[in-house]
């Protein structure tokens, strides 16, 4: 700075030419004239170093575009750059919008990004929930972790979603997580949307119990409706990962902080369901909303829950109030959750029988020791041990006597087909050859006739 001032002052004294001064100061004549011009225009301040950064950027985001992005972000604080970009392009397709990475940098610059702890990620070895390849193939259900409202009341939200479309069917706070209240919510969902083929849950009440086959009263009701209860392995919530991921968003949007009371909290749940289904795009759905993908099930909820029917090849037994059935004047305990229902016993050989409820195998019966044993793991249709990372046992392992014995009843509706023979089909075929059963009409479970063959009397 001082050197520039001396240069200009010496030149103004007319004692030296520009060429002489530039040679003595070691600068080019163009630089000398630039210093002189700036001094004459703005004085000594003109000799200060100027900022060399460009005054405008050709790729700079216009202020009005940044303002539109920030306004949308303020309305949806949990939406990321890709979702924001998709909504802006959908609502204003004729305007040019910045890339998702640019939107992310803008949000970070404005302090609208909460840094998350980095986690080590591994690639999944199979496609998650591969069998949920259509709407209403599998519903997911669970109770989100309870929390308290500002007035101290406990909130237990029951959530139901469609695994394929991610459509949130129900998000309802219940006063108590018992069978009666849970069944009422499922019944309302069945009446509005129809019935799925399977429902995936964890092993907690009221979805499951410690009874034979893990049955609960709620699961028994599902099975009478022809719905397969899928249960994930104990301690592995990732096997219901799509539903658990929805729970995280639900918690962020509605419970941080919680509402003032139960009514206000339920209104928050309803608003979340509307936004989640109708507005929020989902990357796994190609940035479509769940409402754009989901469609109601063709399986309508019946006016009366049908009673199970069994073929004449099975021995039909009523389950009494203590959960036992009668066998050769002896009481055999099956399960108290089946009280008032009827089960079918399919002979495997002279000693062993497979116990069915509706079309599902639930246990093995040892007629010599008069004991009921759980099914082997590979035959259990209720435990989705494959989980979120593998296909469910539902399409290929549902143990259904109508599939094993073709011609025993009229063909099921198209939406109910796809129930195949399980691994124990060979044993069942051998038993069929032994019994040599022929065409015969099915017998309703409500019949009072519990006749037994001579060897069972």
Image: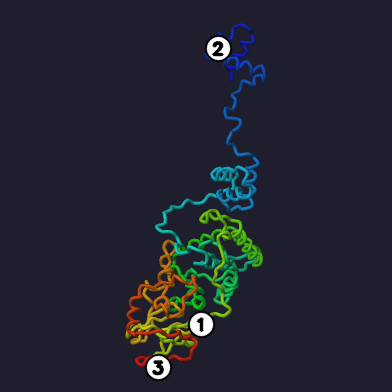
Instruction: Kindly identify which numbered label has been placed on residue 22.
Output: 2
Q: In x, y percent, where is residue 108?
A: 57, 45
Report how far apart the C-alphas of labels 1 and 2 lie in the structure: 107 Å
Q: Residues within 10 Å of mark 1 (few under 14, many from 20)?
A: some
- Quadrant position of the C terminus in the picture: bottom left
Work out whether mark 1 precedes mark 2 in sequence or the reverse, and give the earlier one.
2
Q: Earlier in the sequence, mark 1 or mark 3?
A: 1
Please tell me whether mark 1 or mark 3 is closer to you in this view: 1
Q: Could you tell which of marks 3 and 2 lies nearer the N-terminus?
A: 2
Q: Nearer the viewer, mark 1 or mark 2?
A: 1
Q: Label 1 vs label 3: CA separation?
A: 26 Å
**Residue 41 seen in the current view:** yes
Front disc: 3 or 2: 3
Secondary structure type for disc 1: loop
Q: Is residue 176 above or below residue 50?
A: below
Place of residue 50 in the rendered image (x, y in percent of width and height, measured from the top left): 60, 25
Q: Residues within 10 Å of mark 2 (few under 14, many from 20)?
A: some
Task: Tell me: residue 361, above or below residue 22.
Answer: below
Q: Position of residue 32 (x, y in %)?
A: 58, 15
Q: Which residue is at the far top?
A: 15
Query: Which secondary structure, mark 2?
Result: helix
Mark 3 = which residue? 329
Occupied quadrant, residue 169: bottom right
Q: Which residue is mark 1?
A: 307
Disc 3 residue crowd, few under 14, some 14–19, many 20+, Cα 10 Å: few
């Amino acid at each position: 700075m001082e050197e520039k001032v001396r240069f200009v002052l010496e030149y103004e004294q007319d004692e030296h030419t520009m060429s002489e001064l530039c040679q003595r100061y070691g600068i080019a004549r163009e630089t000398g004239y630039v210093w002189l011009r700036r001094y004459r225009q703005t004085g000594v301040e003109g000799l200060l170093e100027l900022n060399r950064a460009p005054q405008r950027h050709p790729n700079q985001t216009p202020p009005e575009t940044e303002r539109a992005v920030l306004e949308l972000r303020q309305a949806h604080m949990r939406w990321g750059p890709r979702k924001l970009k998709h909504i802006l392009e959908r609502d204003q397709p004729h305007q040019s919008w910045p890339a998702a990475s640019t939107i992310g940098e803008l949000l970070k610059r404005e302090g609208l990004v909460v840094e998350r702890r980095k986690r080590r990620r591994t690639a999944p070895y199979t496609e998650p929930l591969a069998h949920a390849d259509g709407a209403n193939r599998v519903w997911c259900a669970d109770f989100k972790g309870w929390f308290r409202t500002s007035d101290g009341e406990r909130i237990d939200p029951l959530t139901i979603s469609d695994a394929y479309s991610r459509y949130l069917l129900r998000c309802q706070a219940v006063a108590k997580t018992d069978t009666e209240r849970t069944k009422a919510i499922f019944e309302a969902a069945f009446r509005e949307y129809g019935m799925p083929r399977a429902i995936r849950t964890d092993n907690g009440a009221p979805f499951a119990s410690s009874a034979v086959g893990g049955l609960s009263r709620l699961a028994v009701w599902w099975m009478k409706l022809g719905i397969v209860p899928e249960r994930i392995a104990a301690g592995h919530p990732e096997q219901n990962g799509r539903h658990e991921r929805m729970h995280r968003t639900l918690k962020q949007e509605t419970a941080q902080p919680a509402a003032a009371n139960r009514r206000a909290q339920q209104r928050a749940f309803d608003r979340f369901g509307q936004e989640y289904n109708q507005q929020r795009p989902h990357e796994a759905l190609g940035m479509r909303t769940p409402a754009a993908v989901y469609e109601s099930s063709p399986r309508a909820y019946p006016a009366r829950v049908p009673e199970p029917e069994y073929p004449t090849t099975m021995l039909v037994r009523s389950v009494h109030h203590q959960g036992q059935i009668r066998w050769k004047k002896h009481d055999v305990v099956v399960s108290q959750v089946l009280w008032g229902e009827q089960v079918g016993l399919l002979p495997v050989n002279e000693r062993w029988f497979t116990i069915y409820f509706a079309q599902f195998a639930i246990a093995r019966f040892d007629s010599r020791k008069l004991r009921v044993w759980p099914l082997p793991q590979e035959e259990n249709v209720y435990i989705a041990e494959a989980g979120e990372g593998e296909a469910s046992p539902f399409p290929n392992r549902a143990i259904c006597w109508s599939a094993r014995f073709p011609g025993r009843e009229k063909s099921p509706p198209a939406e109910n087909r796809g129930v195949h023979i399980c691994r124990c089909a060979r044993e069942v075929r051998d038993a069929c050859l032994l019994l040599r059963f022929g065409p015969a009409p099915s017998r309703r479970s409500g019949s009072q006739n519990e006749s037994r063959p001579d060897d069972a009397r």
